[in-house]
Amino acid sequence: MTLQKRITIALSIGVLLLVFRIIYNDAQSELPITLNMGIGITILYSVWLFLYERNIISNRNVNSKYLYLFYIVSIPLLIYLINIYKSEAGWQMDVFAILLTIIIFHILFTWFYNKWKTIQELKNEKAKAQLEQLKNQVNPHFFFNTLNRLYALIKSDPDQAQDYVLKLSDMMRFTIYKGKEDEVLLKDEIAYLENYIALQSSRYHKPVQIDFKKEISDPNLPIAPLLNIVLLENAFKHGVETTIENAFVSILLLEKDQQFEIKIQNKYEALEATDNPGIGLNNLQKRLQILYPDKHELELNKETLQTFEATLKLDLS
């Protein structure tokens, strides 16, 4: 039965009860009170159905624990109203008070709950939109530099160029497809970092010491994508590209008991040093606040006059 039919039937019953109420207006019995109660119930029921039809209220998404809370609160309220409405009207007024309270309270409770849920959904959508915007700001200069390097390799070393293309395609596939997901496997995130290191190490014409170590107990843990690459990009950009000699980057990945840590050290030139983090690190901090609130630690320290260390710890439990 459709909502419109149910509304029509309820209103028809209400009109019929109203006719009987007019006919028996002067009856010396409890019949007029009973008819009044029936009219009130049918009106409230019709209003309830109308609000459902207009999608103004709906309890389909109300969590069961909130429904239990509704009943716990409504029971003492009903008992209180019964005592208030005790009069010569008899039991009809008590029943009417109970039904009226349940319907009105449930309407208000459902309406306020749905409004609250809508606000929370809007906040979540806003956070997701902000997160996508921050993801899209991942520095693309690496891909342009890599393509330039690939162009040179095609002529000088075709075999290395093929390997270069495979690693680059894996990275682009991860960035385009996996980067849109909320979480990826830790081993896929690490493979992305390894490809990045391999491509970067072949770009430079100066000697660069790259030390990469990992100790991972569970490579299948879920982790948000494209977080660690920001620290790695920062190390190569400020620790290798701007360093004249003795450039080095040290990467350590640790994971135990769902506690993940990445520590990156790199040399930097004192003239290039600044106390203000760049756009990439600012975006990383914002993403961490959204993705891992109260479950992350990000430390950026200058260990010595020429050594910079970045440490990121994540609770993946």
Image: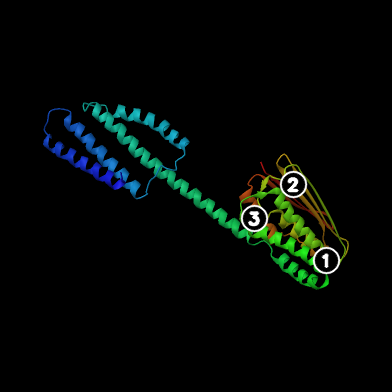
Q: Is residue 99 above or below residue 210?
A: above
Asked whether the residues under the numbered discs 2 and 1 touch, taking CB atoms below 8 Å apart as contact, a structural biologist would say: no
Q: Nearer the viewer, mark 2 or mark 1?
A: 1
How far across and how far down the image is residue 221, in percent?
68, 44
Where is residue 52 shown, x and y percent of the image? 35, 46
Picture residue at 33% right of the left edge, 35% below the top? 101
**Quadrant placement of the C terminus:** top right
* Residue 177 percent across, percent down from the top left: 63, 58
Local SS, label 3? helix
Number of numbered discs overlaid on the protein picture: 3
Give the residue number, with chain letter if any, for mark 3: 178
Earlier-in-chain disc, 2 versus 3: 3
Q: Local crowd at mark 1 within 10 Å, few (<14), some, or many (≥20)?
A: few
Q: Mark 1, mark 3: which one is toward the viewer? A: 3
- Residue 184 versus residue 157 in the image, above or below: above
Q: Amino acid at mark 2?
A: Glu
Which residue in the protein does label 2 denote?
261
